[in-house]
Image: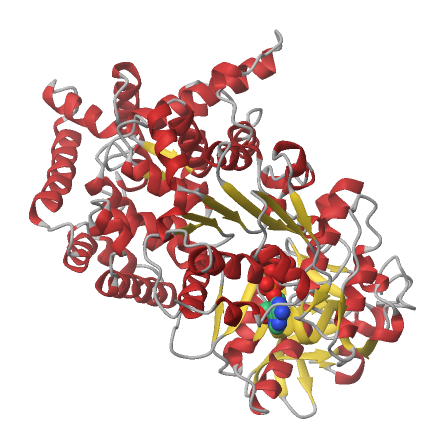
Amino acid sequence: MLSTHKLLINLNEAQTAAVTTDAQHSLVLAGAGSGKTRVLVYRIAWLLAAEGISPYAILAVTFTNKAAAEMRNRVAELLETPARGMWIGTFHSIALRLLTMHHKEAGLPKNFQILDSEDQYRLIRRVISDLELDEKQWQPRMVQSFINGKKNEGIRANEIDDFGDDNSSTLINIYQHYDDHCNRGGLVDFAEMLLCTHQLLLNNPPLLEHYQGRFGAILVDEFQDTNDIQSAFIRLLAGTKNKIMVVGDDDQSIYAWRGAKIDHIIGFKDLFPNTIQYKLEQNYRSSNNILHAANAVIKNNAKRLGKELWSQQGDGELIQYYGAYSEYDEAAFVAEEIDNLIDSGIDGDQIAILYRSNMQSRLLEENLLKHNIAYKVYGGLRFFERMEIKDVLAYVRLINNRHDDVGFERVINTPTRGLGNKTVNQIRNCALINQVSLFSACQILLKNNSLTARAAGSLAGFINMIDEFDNNHDKEQLNPLFDDVIERTGLRDHYQKEPPEKALTRLENLDELLNAAETFVKPQEDDQIGMTALSSFLAQVSLEAGERASDKDVPCVQLMTLHSAKGLEFPYVFLVGLEQGLFPHQNSMEDPEKLQEERRLCYVGITRAEQKLFMTYATSRRIRGRTQGCAPSKFLREVPEKLVNQIQGNVFTAPRGGMFANQDNSAFAQHQPGVLVSHKIFGEGTIIELSGQGDYTQIMVEFQDHGTKILAAKFAKLEVI
Ligand code: ATP
Ligand code: MG
């Protein structure tokens, strides 16, 4: 038995009190980097080692699957033995597990399929068209957010009152049809996973009793970002007897747009009687300059529970501001600084670049590549979201579950097999009339000879091919199946025909998918509950798409959105694109509530940094095809000037209307894209792009002998030839 003394030696007084609490219900509400996640990990170890609770009784909810794996390892490290039997995972992975184990009770087929957000969007579009509604009026994204919003609140279509309003009644109708579709095909979207699990337990008292009896200790990290249904799920499992500890920080609530509500953490004490609350105030992560900057920014939010962090670490380095001429200059600066850091002996994985929007990663990636810096991107155009990968996976999903209509729609005519819109519409209609899946509709149409000879031949070929894949392959051996699919469906040839550069990346991606299939190891937990390697692979792809690492062997610089950086920490952090309209985001600038959420996001970003924080902005940026002058983010000015070193530009004196207010651009009027120019050193070239204005104008030129360069127009002295 591990000495409990050894456990507590690494905790401060407040943390020890929380870890060893006798309270049935406890809440740790504390700022960033104060050790909340650490408390949760130690609490699990404490429950096992000191209180003798069985690992089977532990249910811990984390924010990402990666965090779950880390938590499991940390507990094993602390206990010096792997603790099997614990359930640690995200809300979604826990829900998925329950649904898989109890699919019958949940009313799902054994091989039900997860719909990711894009799949869901496609299906909604189809429902809108089935109902003969106009997409312009019933915008699929809007409908999607309506449906998910309701599901996050735990509300089904038949539970919504339309109050006699036609608009509402149409939305409800779409929701209902969409759900009918999903039910017929065994399709489960992300919000449904949680709602369905909640209903599974709610409507099944013996099952609920079983799990309430099993999970004697429930622990939840990042509780400030739970939505209604997640909170209800936890409440249900906690019952009246179980221990529950939740930890969180109201200042880091950043998922309101996905239905998260701070109220759940604020109201926790009301729902769980005799809750003991613990406060942690010492920050162990960041040096004081970083911490003071974070405190100063978040102070501008009105709705706060209010807490200040302090650290025993010294002041550390100043925060580095860099005002770039353009987004190109910004990306070049970041890559160069990172190159210097790596040269000075720092590993790439100690460094993170955080941005507000996924689209910002592309230029950063390009510049890192130029410097040969290994990196990985979380989220964004994730590997598993790329077109060619989704095509292969759609086939595989159809092989796994014939009723997967989303997969069917994706590949019925990809690569083209002469099944045009007319036939596909016929299939859709037949499915609609008979209330069956598209695959079954094909079988009906073929049986009734309802198709032209050509369409029938082609469709029969498709159906047979899918059946043959299914019959010929072992569901435990993924690589041969995937390989066969890529070849026999003609997908490889199909992509080969694209322009060479595109074709190359697509084929490389297909090979990478084969690699993934080859190296896939079915997790023990999935095996125990009888999942095939194929189902397990598909489930992981859907759940973890954004978390996959591209290269495990090299320490990689990490690129991710601020949203996915929650809970993480890095010695060196680059927070980029701090401009009005980008961060805070355009959609949030006018709405005080949303602006506060943006500020919390900024607080999350700043508090990820341990030693050195760079904050950069561009004074011009190309957005939706137009280069615009940009004003530095207001958050930059909220950091006290004394904490900042301004490498280039000055946010504290910059004109608030943008750097280019009143800048005269006439000097470079001739320098338009396509114009031939000559440079004293680089020779002749063609202008590709102009950005910025006045003295800040930058010109990108493709030189005949020196490749592409970005030059400050004022100093480049380009001559038009
Ligand atoms: P966030 O709000 O960002 O999720 P957090 O409150 O969960 O942060 P942790 O990630 O648990 O904070 O801890 C921050 C860092 O401080 C970690 O590296 C952790 O190991 C370290 N730390 C926490 N408590 C202590 C302690 N008592 N002694 C030494 N290091 C500590
Ligand atoms: Mg944490």
Q: Position of residue 94 (x, y in %)?
A: 40, 44
Quadrant of the rendering where the N terminus is positioned: bottom left
Quadrant of the rendering where the C terminus is positioned: bottom right
Q: Quadrant of residue 265?
A: top right
Res 591 seen here: no
Please report the residue visible at 49 percent of the width from the left and 66 percent of the height from the top: 4
Please report the residue visible at 68 percent of the width from the left and 66 percent of the height from the top: 576
Q: Quadrant of residue 293?
A: bottom right
* 117 left or right of 400 in image: right
Tell which quarter ligand 1 is in: bottom right
- Residue 76's place in the image compared with 18, above or below, is below
Q: Position of residue 671 (x, y in %)?
A: 73, 71
- Residue 470's place in the image compared with 705, above or below, is above
Return the residue nearer the eye: 26 or 353. 26
- Residue 150's place in the image compared with 84, above or below, is above
Q: Position of residue 668 (x, y in %)?
A: 79, 72
- Residue 108's place in the image compared with 572, above or below, is above
Please report the residue visible at 35 percent of the width from the left and 49 percent of the height from the top: 56
Q: How many marks?
A: 0
Q: Position of residue 589 (x, y in %)?
A: 78, 46
* 271 left or right of 424 in image: right
Q: Quadrant of residue 160?
A: top right
Please report the residue visible at 40 percent of the width from the left and 66 percent of the height from the top: 76
* 635 left or right of 542 in image: right
* 713 left or right of 545 in image: right
Return the residue nearer the eye: 707 or 412. 412
Return the residue nearer the eye: 427 or 331. 331
Residue closest to the far left: 472
